Amino acid sequence: MKSYTLKEIKDRYIGAIGTPERDQYEMELRAELDAYRLGEAVREARKKQNLTQKQLGERVGVGEAQISKIENGKASTLGTINRVFRALGATSGTLDLGSLGRIALW
């Protein structure tokens, strides 16, 4: 039985590095990882303040389900993310998106 490396599998099924398909895959993967990290930061800050998702949602003006989605790395608007960080008392409105750079929310 032949073994394959992850690179070989990606090259075969997604495309070689530098192809449009592979570039799109890598970009989407980075975006998902960034969303996951953002969600983890929100969850940690919320827990440090002993807030439930419902309580944070009330501060932000969204439902508990929306806070859960954010914490689980699901899509949300920058406006909502902005309100979440403000509700958590964030003093900086800059998000570090890794290789994509930094963006200022306020």
Image (spheres, helix red, strand yellow):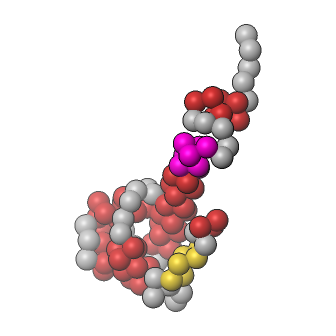
Residue beneath the point at 46% across and 82% down = 105
Residue beneath the point at 63% across and 29% down = 12
Residue beneath the point at 51% across and 66% down = 38
Q: How many marks?
A: 0
Q: From the image, which quarter does the N terminus lie in?
A: top right
Q: Is residue 24 above or below residue 41?
A: above
Q: Position of residue 66 (x, y in %)?
A: 31, 63
Asked whether residue 25 is drawn in magenta, I would say yes
Asked whether residue 6 is drawn in magenta, I would say no
Q: Position of residue 68 (x, y in %)?
A: 36, 60
Residue 16 seen from this side: yes
In-front residue for pair 100/72: 100
Majority secondary structure in the magenta region? helix
In the displayed image of the protein, which residue is found farthest to the front?
19
Q: Position of residue 95 (x, y in %)?
A: 54, 76
In-front residue for pair 20/101: 20
Residue 40 seen from this side: no
Q: From the image, which quarter does the C terminus lie in?
A: bottom left
In the picture provided, is 76 more to the left or to the right than 99?
Answer: left
In-front residue for pair 4/41: 4
Q: Is residue 86 above or below residue 15?
A: below
Q: Which residues are magenta?
A: 19-26
In the picture provided, is 80 more to the left or to the right than 37?
Answer: left
Residue beneath the point at 34% across and 74% down = 80
